[in-house]
Image (spheres, rainbow, N blue to C red):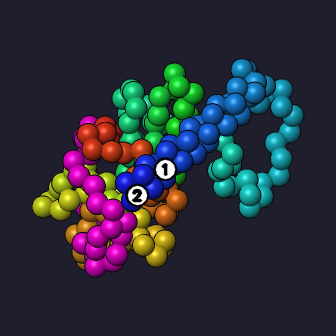
Amino acid sequence: MARSSSGIVAGLTAAAIAAVGFLGYQASATAPAHPPRAAEQGPAPAPSQSAAKPDPAKPVPVPEGSGTGVRVVYSVGQKRVWLVGDPAAGQQPKSFTVMPSTVHPKAGTYTVGSRSGSVTGSDGVPIEHVVRFASSEGVAIGFSARADGATPEPDPSKKTGGIRMAKADGDAMWAFATINSKVVVVP
């Protein structure tokens, strides 16, 4: 019975990810092919507090040089992850911010080597949906979400490899990045 319940949950998660990708594709299909040039747009609006923030409705482009195909892309400098699905199947990339660890992976291509549903992180905090893909300085590096949902900055005096994300993003990562999935790290 537990096996069929987990199959149902996995199926529902996959369906939800596909639905979000399809809606993103539909939204991008309605955007103009050639937006007007700055001179044609008229005067720029006065700066405001909201103008400084990126528009969450607009997708953040996947970094150039991050490879092709289905993959996880992690930009250390942007503190951001992209789950890049199959565009032929109408899957648009899902992107979200993360809190980097104190030990960073080198730029390159990796594969997911191990996963854990819930463990205690190297910082002593209960974490879930751990997806490990690299090691550096003797520290395992991977994506995870804290069980309490918090994403504080790591203690700089500790060597940790947990790239932390919000719980919902951790759920999406867990569903997307299975064993042997490709992970591309860019600066």
Q: Which of 184 and 181 lies nearest the eye of the viewer?
A: 181
Does 3 sit above or below residue 62?
A: below
Does 62 sit above or below residue 120?
A: above
Does 2 sit above or below residue 28?
A: below
> What amino acid does circle 1 point to?
Ile
Rate crowding at label 2 as few (under 14), some (14 to 19) or many (20 or more) other CA atoms within 10 Å.
Answer: few
Query: Which dot, 2 or 1, sits closer to the camera?
Result: 2
Residue 157: x percent and y percent?
Answer: 25, 77
Magenta stretch in the rendered image? 101-128
Rate crowding at label 1 as few (under 14), some (14 to 19) or many (20 or more) other CA atoms within 10 Å.
Answer: few
Magenta-colored stretch includes residue 97? no
Q: Which mark is residue 100?
A: none
Q: Which of 129 and 121 lies nearest the eye of the viewer?
A: 129
Residue wearing tag 1: 8
Residues tagged 2 and 1 counted as in contact (Cβ below 8 A) = no
**Horizontal side, residue 22 vs residue 99: left or right:** right
Q: Which mark is residue 1?
A: 2
SS class, disc 2? loop
